[in-house]
Each structure stands twice: as structure tokens, then as C-alpha cells.
Amino acid sequence: MTSVPPPSPAHRNGWLDRKVIGWALYDWGNSAFATTVMAGFFPVFYKQHLRGQVEPTTSTFELGLFNALASLAVVLMAPALGAIADLGRTKKPMLAAWAGIGILATAGLGLAGDYGWLLAGSLYALGVVGFSASNIFYDAMIISVAEGRRTDAVSAFGFALGYLGGGLLFALNVLMTLKPGWFGLPDSAAAVRVSFLTVAAWWALFSLPLLVLVPERAPRQGAGWATAARMGIVRLVRTIAGIRGMRNIALFLVAYYFYIDGVSTIIKMAVDYGLALGFPARSLILALLLVQFVGFPAAIAFGWLGERFGTRRAILTGLAIYVGITVWGVAMRDETDFYLLAVAVGCVQGGVQSLSRSMFARLIPQRKSAELFGFYNMMGKFATLLGPILVGVTARVSGSSRLSLLSIIILFLAGGALLLCVRERSPAGEALVS
């Protein structure tokens, strides 16, 4: 008779234990940077207050350049940082260090006073690097709090708390800018600077539960910082050379690149449409808030779908909905459509992202989790490259910016088709099933 191993303590106590909560609260904290700083205030603050005297195309180019440089830095560093962290039991120290860089840069935006545009853009780019790099280790540490199909629910819970936490602080920050007098502030510009300080404090405070409550699994062969750095670079070179041998993982990464490019592009196109149709700034802010608060229960729901019907099926369902969203975006005519589109995006955005993370976590060997999540995050940073090119070329050929959006469907179809070829781990996590 084959003996059956006893259930793990995590299984006996249910999936929502203090380790999971501590891990997920980091998403609650750092999502404030993504909402208030990256998506909400800094682009407007930069264009209107710091560069209001130059042509809009110039400030747009500069802002795009700061974003591009930050993304390039993360792309170049991510796999190497992950490889080093895997060997030295340094995921938590690495997360703390990069989060600290992002937090200090964000606080700098609030404390610098009448800083010049170059300093502000540099602090913003540094904040983006800290935010993105810390997420490599945050994502990789999911293996310390979940395993098997339970990973779907835990990953979704993290995204859900991110939507809620980022949305709550963003709502407060929006109120501060609309009613600065209520908070003893002279004007909206001062309110934006104070908002940056609240983001830094929020991010720092909610980083502590992960650092205190979540244990980091020790590598089979531990190493000091210097040795880990040397061995990590060597192993990274070997991984890159042998990535073709990891056919299933490589196939997933390519599929993820295609469909996450579509996800990122359709979000940006929706906002551009809102601006092109003349919707007021308050409508855009409200739409962003809708995405945050709809995303909270929707991410939880997708985690349940992944556990109940399979992770791949749930992701493919989300991609099918995105195809419908794309068609809807082409036909959008008024503000009501814009709000409904924001709700639809909120329903699937977090679900597709969270289940992609949990599926990838089950596909990779645990000893290389941070290194391979470095590749995963690198693919995410390369996203939104093909989408804008497809939209631009199609618009040039068809002469219609609306019809050009339909080209994004190619990314969802390509990503979905490749995902069907990925062999998915069974709920128990042992075997691979087609």
C-alpha cells in the first residue's frame, strides 16, 4: 500500500494564513505607486506644472523617455538579480533594498519643492525601477507561501489587495487635489506633492508584514553575497544558453508576452480614446478608480475560476473577454461606453495577471524561482511594443484609428493559441497535463 503524506500545515489551516496575508499586503502597499504616481498624478503634474511652457509633444516625448529608460534598466537587470537572489537566500533583502530605493525616490518627489523637470523625471524613473525590481522578488516569493493549485487563490488574493489598497489611497489623493482646502493645502499642486509623500509612507508601512511574517525558503546550496553574485551570473548565462531546453517554460513566456502586450495596449488605447473624445479629466480619474475597485472582487473571482476549472482555461476566458473589449473600444461613442469599458477591463485585468503569475510559478523549478521570474518580469517590461506598432501600421493602411484597434486582437489570439500548447501542472503539482 502506498503511503499518503500528511497534509501540510498550510493546507490544514486553510490557504489564508498570516504568511499569505503578509505577502499580499506588499501588493496593497506598492500598488499605490502604480495608481497615484505612475497612472494618475505624475504624468499630469509633469506636463501641466513642470513642463507647461513647452509643446505637449515635447513633454510627452520626455515622459516617454523616462519610462523607457526605467524599463530598459529593469530589463537588463532582472534575470541577473533573480539568479543572484536564488543562490544567496536574499529575496527578502533584495526586495527591501529595491523597495527602499523606490520609496525614497517617491518621497523625493514630494520633498524636492520647486524641482526642475530633469530632477523630477529622474526621481520618477528611479521610483519605477525600484517598484519594478522589487516586484521580481515579491513574485518569486509566492513559492514560500503557496503551492499547487492553491497558488491561484493566493496570487489572485495579492492582486485583489493591490487593487483595493492602491484604489483607497488613490481615492484619498484625488479628494486632496479636488478639495485641497479641506486638508490645509494652498492648491492642487501642493496636494499632488503631499500625495507623493503619502504613497511613500503607505508603501513603506505595508512592506513590513512581508519582511516580518514571510519566511524565505533556503536554497539547497547557500552562498554569501559575493559568491552568489559570481555564481548567479554564471548560472544566468547557462540558463539563457539552455532556455530552448526548457520548452514548456519558454513557450509560456512567449505566449505571455503576446497576450500581456495586448492587455497593456488596450488599456492605453481606451484612455487615449477618452481624451480624443473630449472627456474631462475627472471622467478619466473616475474610470481609473472604477478599474481599481472592480478589480478587487474580480481578481478573487478569477482565482476561484482557476482552482475550479483550471488556470489555463480561466486565462483563456479572460483573453476572450479582452477580444470583446477591443471590439467594444472600436464602437465606443460616449462617456457611458467609456465607464462601462473601464468596468469590463477591471473585471479581467487582475484575473489574467494573477493567474499568469500563479501558472508560471507552478511551471518553474523552485530553485530558480527568482531568476525565472526575472525573465517573466522582463517579458512584461517588453510588453506594449508590438501593440502600438500594429495599431500604427493598421491606422496608416486603413486610414481609420478606430479600425486600427482591431489589430490588437491578433495579440490575444496569438497568445491564446500558444498558451494552449503549454503543458499545465496538475492541481497536486506533480505531473504535467496537456
Image (spheres, helix red, strand yellow):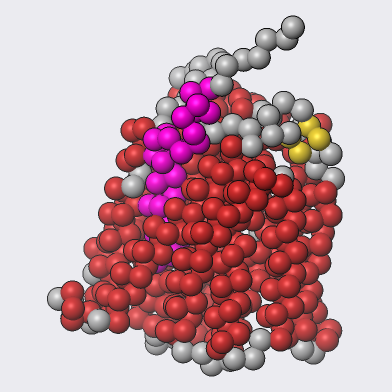
Vertical position of residue 380 compared to residue 9: above or below: below
Residue sitting at 69 percent across and 29 percent down? 429
Which residue is at the front of the view, 263 or 243?
263
Which residue is at the front of the view, 122 or 215?
215
Q: Is residue 171 magenta?
A: no
- Outermost residue, front side: 1
Which residue is at the front of the view, 108 or 252?
252
Measured from the top left, where is residue 239 in percent x and y? 71, 31
In this rendering, would 66 be left or right of 201?
right
Which residue is at the front of the view, 366 or 7?
7
Q: Is residue 22 magenta?
A: yes
Measured from the top left, where is residue 372 in percent x and y? 64, 37
In this rendering, would 13 be left or right of 4?
left
Residue sitting at 59 percent across and 91 percent down? 334
Residue sitting at 42 percent across and 59 percent down? 164
Q: Quadrant of the N terminus?
A: top right
Q: Quadrant of the C terminus?
A: top right
Q: Which residue range is magenta in the image?
A: 8-36
Vertical position of residue 235 compared to residue 116: above or below: above
Asked which quadrant contains residue 340, the reply is bottom right
- Outermost residue, top side: 1
Task: Kindly tell me whether residue 133 is visible in this rendering.
Answer: no
- Which secondary structure class fits the magenta region best? helix
Measured from the top left, where is residue 207 in percent x and y? 35, 44
Asked which quadrant contains residue 180, the reply is bottom left
Task: Kindly tell me whether residue 221 is visible in this rendering.
Answer: yes
Measured from the top left, where is residue 368 in percent x and y? 62, 29
Asked which quadrant contains residue 106, the reply is bottom left
Vertical position of residue 314 compared to residue 197: above or below: above
What is the total number of numbered labels drawn onto the structure image?
A: 0
Residue sitting at 18 percent across and 74 percent down? 183
